[in-house]
Image: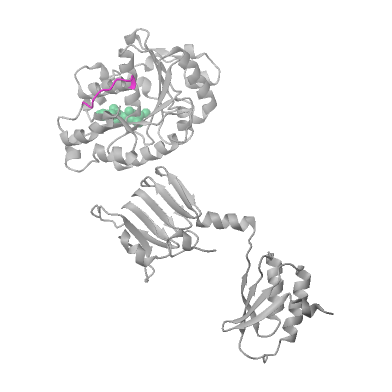
Amino acid sequence: MNRQKQQYVTIKGTKDGLTLHLDDTCSYRDLVMELEEKLSVNQTNEPDGPLVAVHLKVGNRYLTPEQEEEIRTLIRTKKNLVVESIESNVITKEEALIWKRETEIVSVSKIVRSGQILHVQGDLLLIGDVNPGGTVIAGGNIFILGALRGIAHAGYYGNKEAVIVASVMKPMQLRISDIMNRAPDYKAEERNEMECAYVDDNNQIVVDRLQLLTHLRPHLTRLERRL
Amino acid sequence: MGEAIVITSGKGGVGKTTTTANLGTALALAGKRVCLVDTDIGLRNLDVVMGLENRIIYDLVDVAQGRCTVQKALVKDKRFDDKLYLLPAAQTSDKTAVTPEQMKKLIQELKQDYDYILIDCPAGIEQGYRNAVAGADEAIVVTTPEVAAVRDADRIIGLLEKEENIRPPRLIINRIRSHMVKSGDMLDIDEIVMHLSIDLLGIIADDENVIKASNNGEPIVLDPNSKASIAYRNIARRILGESVPLQSLEEEQKGVFAKIKKFFGVR
Ligand SMILES: Nc1ncnc2c1ncn2[C@@H]1O[C@H](COP(=O)(O)OP(=O)(O)O)[C@@H](O)[C@H]1O
Ligand SMILES: [Mg+2]
């Protein structure tokens, strides 16, 4: 047995725990076998010691969810090791499409009229109005170059960081994630500046000047987003 | 080949039937051959407003279901020579007695013989609405300066915009009371047009003579002097392609008029 020399698995200790570099050209079976052996040999820590985080870097290998689970279980059985992250350079086409949908800005030029619902997965850039009784929904942020007089729901899948921006902010209702904010019953005076709505530290939706967003949500820019 | 125009609103009681009767009459007065089609099956009243109810023998449902020809069911309005006809709705069936496909075929047939087919749409957005718009080339949305009516107009415009065969709808604002607009108790015209953002075809004042005329079966447009009559005639001229500045309310509402002018300026 000269498997040891092949070095499919390289272990490095860091201040965050262990980083395991897994070869991405050998077969999956060989990889698992070597992992098993290496970890058994290296099991020098006292079994009751604190949990050690393990970070896996699998390079250009795609691991199916089942394979990921197998590796996690294998490592977990080595007493005090626990997988904290698995990093791969590759994702499936399907995941890529979902990622694209969730992070792209969809531009729509139309008036969302009473009874109509416009729903996008990522950010929404609406060039037009949302009339009373109309609804816009986005998984991400909502930017409206026009008047918001209907309902807007940003961060639809649970993102409280999402914001709603409108040139004219006169909504019937604002929702961000699962937080709701009804329009005041009294008629607010018309303000002539762009406004934004966000969730503050008290878990409430507040409406304020657009310019505040630079400080409140510095990562609004798309380029800085990641999977 | 004629043009079919559906007159619709979403909300009931805003003046669809009154508008259909008056625009049809005004177009006939202008020398066009016009056929009015009442699609409000079960609640017909275009025949009453036109003063033609006593002459009805067959109706829309009879034609759609093949019990008689269109020609047989059409009621001729004797006041206008050979210019104005009405296809009445059935009183005894309901909206499902006719399908959109049947309506399409029927309107297509009428377009061979008439310059304008005006289709009076029932309230609502169900089958009655779908029947009414099925054969239309154009749509006129009627609203009043009330929040609920404008909301329903917005809903209908959204539905009309999805119809591929219908040109962008145009708006008529009916029953304007200038003193209420001035006092802020009614939406102003500019506000409504901005909000709905479709072309304004005309505005009509609230005028009790309209109600009297309808009750007598004589559309108001036959009275040359009333303001509502002039407003309807002007709308008819705009439908015919003339550019006619807004007339009826501007004396009382100079400010509003100035704002509205721009909507006609582009034509
Ligand atoms: N401009 C107007 N001024 C006064 N009354 C009007 C005017 N337009 C319509 N009406 C009245 O309003 C009522 C509803 O009109 P109608 O045309 O039957 O509405 P719809 O067909 O939309 O239900 C009728 O009694 C009609 O006479
Ligand atoms: Mg009616």
Magenta includes B102? Answer: no
Q: Residue at x 41, y 26 (%)?
A: B138
Task: Identify whether B6 is placed above or below A221.
Answer: above
Q: Position of residue A6 (x, y in %)?
A: 77, 76
Tell me where residue B147 sits by quadrant: top left
Q: Position of residue A179 (x, y in %)?
A: 41, 63
Task: Identify whether A177 is placed above or below B78.
Answer: below
Task: Name the quadrant of the N terminus of chain B.
Answer: top left
Tell me where residue A90 sits by quadrant: bottom right
Task: Name the quadrant of the C terminus of chain B.
Answer: top left
Magenta includes B243? Answer: yes
Q: Ligand 2 is found in which quarter of the picture?
A: top left
Q: Position of residue B183 (x, y in %)?
A: 16, 42
Q: Is residue A58 left or right of residue A186?
A: right
Query: Which segment is the magenta one?
Result: B239-247
Q: Residue at x 15, y 29 (%)?
A: B251
Q: Is residue B175 left or right of residue B251?
A: right
Tell me where residue B168 sits by quadrant: top left
Q: Residue at x 35, y 67 (%)?
A: A215
